Image: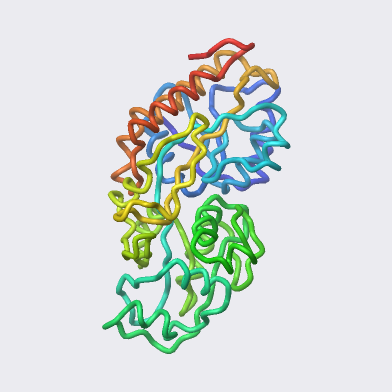
Amino acid sequence: MKVIKSLTLAVAVLAASTLSVKAQDNTLLGAGSTFVYPLFSKIFSKYTASKVNYQSIGSGGGILQLTNKTVDFGDSDAPLNADQTAKMSAPVLHIPMTSGAVVVTYNIPGVTAHLNLSGKDLADIFLGKITNWNSPEVKDANPGVKIPDMPIVVIHRSDGSGTSFIFTDFLTKVNPDWASKVGKASAVNWPAGLGAKGSEGVAGLVKQTPGGITYVELAYAKQNNMTFANIQNKSGKYIAPTIEATTLASNVTIPDDSKVSITNTDNPKGYPIASFTWALIYKEQNYGGRSKARATELLKLLWYNVHQGQAECAPLNYAPLSKSAVKAAEKILKSATYDGKAIL
């Protein structure tokens, strides 16, 4: 099974533009979340029933391509909002793929410890209210750690990002000032800092910037040997972003449409900046000249993802879907139709 690496958005749109007309081969086209890209790369490399071209361009880009019907599926770390839903030409299904943690990583020369940060202080850092690493707020949470007198350089995503949605969703829940001034979205008006595109962009900028701080998915941070913080959860405990702590956060009741936020978990041992990521497909698959065979291949791929594909989660630092999440995913996939008739 060949996985075609990420393309630029312009090339991807051009390559995908034939989908709505003929779909020249049996390659399934997907685009979206960078958060889930390491996992998708592994799963798709083992899937032999069809080829898969997944473009890691950010959740916003994946949603746009699905809106334009230039891909078979999008992937987003945030459910469609009202505006995005209104722009779709037909109902869209959200199929949970996995859950994962967003970590806060930083570049403080001489500091290799996993710093403790509360959600309130983290929001104040990204608001530009806490501007020095040696501030009382950071020092008080990290007794025994020698933190230099150094300006904090906030770095954030400049593109539409599901990772940004997860991060700002958490900050909105834990800091009223953030909630009133910024809020949660895949793209917000950042009150401070420098922007960079994609996980690669923000991570690269932090590595080059003494005093820098940003947020990336756990799998990406571990693959790149980046230092990350323990984050205070609702119970007041500083929690490391482990698979176990993410699993505890994601062990919640799954609604029929699977749209649920798991940030700021009630679980006393759960990591508070975690989320599901969702594959997005049109409920009615007969559109744009698509064949029933192609629609069936897509549904089989996503069925594989939520079953056999879950074995790849833990080795790549993602939390496998719970039994209730798998059941929800199965029910949603079985609701997809072609000419109004169930595909699976």
Q: Residue at x 31, y 85 (%)?
A: 146
**81 or 114, nearer to the observer:** 81
Q: Residue at x 54, y 27 (%)?
A: 27
- Whether residue 170 sits left or right of residue 23 in the image: it is left
Q: Position of residue 145 (x, y in %)?
A: 30, 82
Query: Please, is residue 206 above or below residue 315 in the view?
Result: below
* Quarter of the image where one finds residue 142: bottom left
* Quarter of the image where one finds residue 179: bottom right
Q: Please give the count of numbered marks on the rendered protein.
A: 0
Q: How is the image coloured?
A: rainbow
Query: Do we see residue 67 in this rendering?
Result: yes
Q: Position of residue 304 (x, y in %)?
A: 39, 26
Q: Position of residue 173 (x, y in %)?
A: 51, 58
Q: Residue at x 55, y 35 (%)?
A: 30
Query: Please, is residue 213 above or below residue 30 in the view?
Result: below
- Whether residue 204 sits left or right of residue 195 in the image: it is left
Q: Quadrant of the N terminus?
A: top left
Q: Residue at x 55, y 53 (%)?
A: 165
Q: Position of residue 305 (x, y in %)?
A: 41, 30
**307 or 70, nearer to the observer:** 307
